[in-house]
Image (spheres, rainbow, N blue to C red):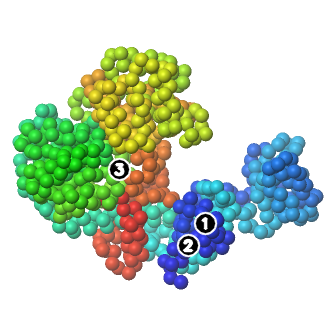
Amino acid sequence: MSVQKSLNTDIRYIKGVGEARAKAFSKLGIATLGDLISYFPRTYEDRTVIKPISMLVPDETVCVKAMAAAAPRLTHVRKGLDLVKVRVVDEGGALELTFFNQSFVKDMIKPGETYVFYGKVTGSYRRLEMLNPVFEKEGARNITGRIMPVYRLTAGLSQNVLAAAVRQGLEACLEQLPDDLPPAVREKYRLAQARYAYENIHFPDSPEALNIARRRLIFEELFVISAAMGYMRQGRSAKKGRGLKPVDLSEFYGALPFQLTGAQRRAIEQSVGDMTRDTPMNRLVQGDVGSGKTVVAAACCWFAFKNGCQSAFMAPTEILAEQHYRSLSALLEPLGMRVGLLTGSMTAKQKREVVGQLKLGELDTVIGTHALLSESVEFFDLALVITDEQHRFGVEQRSALSSKADAPHVLVMSATPIPRTLALIIYGDLDVSIIDELPPGRQKVDTYTVSEALRERTYKFMRKLVGEGRQVFVVCPMVEESETADEDLKSAQEYAKKLQTEIFPDLKVALVHGRMKAKEKDAVMAAFAAGDIDILVSTTVIEVGVDVPNAALMVVENADRFGLSQLHQLRGRVGRGKHKSYCILFEGAGGAVSRERLKIMTETNDGFAISEADLRLRGPGDFFGSRQHGLPEMKIANLASDMDTLSKAQEAAQALLKADPGLTLPENRALREKIERLFEMKSATLN
C-alpha cells in the first residue's frame, strides 16, 4: 500500500470505528487516517502516580492500586439510573467506588483481583469515595500507569474510544509515515523524526518525550505555512505584469480637500511604486477604523486613469459599495474621472448601461459588489483590482475579478488591525502597508465597562442622546432565544421587542441580523443611515464599514462573549461625525476575568495594541469572528505563545527557498506536495 493511500484510508476501515462511529468522527473533522493521527490532544492526564489509599486527599484526581474486597453490587435506583458500588482495599485503607449507568462494570470487577483505578477522590477523610473511575487489571498499562491524552469530544465518542482509534491508526501507518521536513532542516534545528513525534504527542513515554514531540510538530506546522507563503510569493514575482508609467502625484495631492497624514502618503507611494514594476502588485493596506484607507484606493485608481487604464473596486455588501461609491466619486470626479456603481439590486436597465460603459472604456473606475463577477461584465482595459475587507471574499471571488484582465495589479484593504506576527502568516504572500496614524479631527470614543446595576442609567443616557438628535447602536451576541440554554444572553429579536414596547415606546427601534435577506438588511441600514431610526438593535452584522456619522453611542450586551478585536470594530461604528461619541460594554456573566480583559478597551483606542492583546488572550481565530479568513488551521501551534518557534521556522523556510526556489530537489519533494495540498485546502489565503 502506498504511503498516501494509507493516510487517505477512510476512517470507517480503522479497527473499532465502523459506520456509526465514523459519523461522530466526521463532526470532529476526522474523515481519514491522516486526519485521525493529526487530531492532537487538547491536554493530558498524568496517570503515572499511584497513591496508597491512606494518602488520598479529597478533590485530587489520582491512580489507586487496590483489590476488590467483594463482588460489585448493582442497584436500579429508578428508570434511567443504575448504580454499581464496590469496595476496594489496599494495605492501608478502603475506598468506596460508585459507577453511574455502567451496569457492565458488575461483571468486569472480580472479588480478590487487583486493579488500578483512576478518578477524582470525593467524600471525607473518614469515608473516601471515587466516582466513575476508569480502571484496568494491574500490569495492563493501557489506560493507567502512563500519561494519557485528553481529546475534544463530540456526542457518541468517549476518551477511551478516541484514544483506542488513534492507537489503531498509528499502528496502521507509523511504518509508512512520511517526514515532510527536509533532513537538513531537522538536523539543524535538532527536531525529532515524524514517527517519534506522532507516537509521543498522543501517547508520551514521559513529560520530556511529550515536549520533544510538541516542539517538532509546532515547528513543522509553522515551517510548512512559512514555506508555502514564500513559495507563493516567489511564484508571484516570476509572474509578468504590466508596469505603468510613473506620474507626478502632486496633481492628485493638490486636488484633495484635506491634508494627508504621513502614513497615508507612505501607503500611496508604496502602492504606486508597485504599479510601476512589471510584476503585479499584491499589496495589503491595513489601517484602523477611520484611518483613511479610501484615499489610498483613490490615488491608485487615479494613477491607473493617468495611464489610460480602468480600475475595479469590490466591496462585500451593497451598503459598503454605495458608501465607497459616494466617497470615491467625491475624490475622483473633480479630477476628470468617470466613476460607476454596479450592485445586484440595480435594475436590469441600469446594469446593462454600466456593463456597456465598462466594455467601451466610458467608465474609468467601477465600484461594486460580487455583481462585478458576473460573466456579462467585461472591461475595456482593466489594470487594477481593489478588494475591501478581503477576508470576507473567498479566493474564487477575488481571482474571478482578477481574471477579467491579464495579471492586473491587486490592492487589498482591511480595517481589521492584525498584529504583525499574525499578518506574517495570513498575508505572507502580500506586501503590507500599515496606516498607523488617524487623520486630524477623528475623535476618541469614550469607552466604559459597566455591570447590570447601571442598566437604568444607560437607558436614560440613550434617551438623552436621542433627544439631542443622535442615534444609538445596540449589539447582542445572538439572534434569538433558542440558540443557547444560557438565559443571561441577550437575543437581538427579544431585546429589540422589549426596547420598543417597554423601554422606548415613543422612539423608533429597528432590528437587523445576519439571517435577514440582504435586501431587508440593506433597507434597515439605509433607513438608519438616513436618520429614520433612533435605536438600531443588531448582531455583529454591522461590525464592518457602515458609516453613520450621526450615531454617537454603541451599547454592547454580553461584551464578554466578543473578542477584543471584534469589540474594537463595533466601537468604530461611532465617532465618525462631529459629535462626541461613547461606547458602553455590559460585562455579562464573565466575572473578574472578563472585566480585566474588557479593561483594555477602556484604556486604549489603538486597534493594533488591542489586536496584540487579543492574540495573547484568545489566539488567532477571533480576528474575523468565524473561520472565513483562510488562515490555515493551526492543529498544534499557538501564535500567541510560539512566536520564537515561528521566527525560527520562517528563517528555515527562507533559507530553504533560497537554496531550492522550486522545491525540486528529491529531499524537498514531500514538502512541496504538502504545500500544494495546503493550497488546495486553504486556497482562501491566495490572492
Q: Amino acid at mark 1?
A: Ala
Q: Nearer the viewer, residue 670 or 554?
A: 554
Earlier in the chain: of badge 3 and badge 2, it is 2
Q: Amino acid at mark 2?
A: Asp
Tell me the element at label 3.
helix
Asked whether the viewer can see residue 32, the reply is yes
Give the vertical position of 321 relative to 39 (above or below): above
Counting from the top left corner in percent of width and height, residue 477 is at 49, 37
- Give the labeled residue for mark 1: 22
In the image, what residue occupies the spot 84% across and 41% down? Answer: 124
Q: Are marks 3 and 1 in contact (CB under 8 Å)?
A: no
Earlier in the chain: of badge 3 and badge 1, it is 1
Where residue 278 sits, quadrant-wise, is bottom left
Q: Is residue 591 left or right of residue 615?
A: right
How many numbered discs sit on the rendered protein? 3
The Cα–Cα distance between marks 1 and 2, rounded to whole angstroms, is 9 Å
Earlier in the chain: of badge 1 and badge 2, it is 2
- Give the labeled residue for mark 2: 10
Q: Amino acid at mark 3?
A: Arg
In the image, what residue occupies the spot 51% across and 74% down? Answer: 8
Query: Which image quarter is the C terminus in?
Result: bottom left
- Give the labeled residue for mark 3: 392
Q: Nearer the viewer, residue 34 or 663?
A: 34
Q: Is residue 268 left or right of residue 223?
A: left
Counting from the top left corner in percent of width and height, residue 665 is at 35, 79
Tell me the element at label 1.
helix
In the image, what residue occupies the spot 58% across and 70% down? Answer: 11
Q: Are marks 1 and 2 in contact (CB under 8 Å)?
A: yes
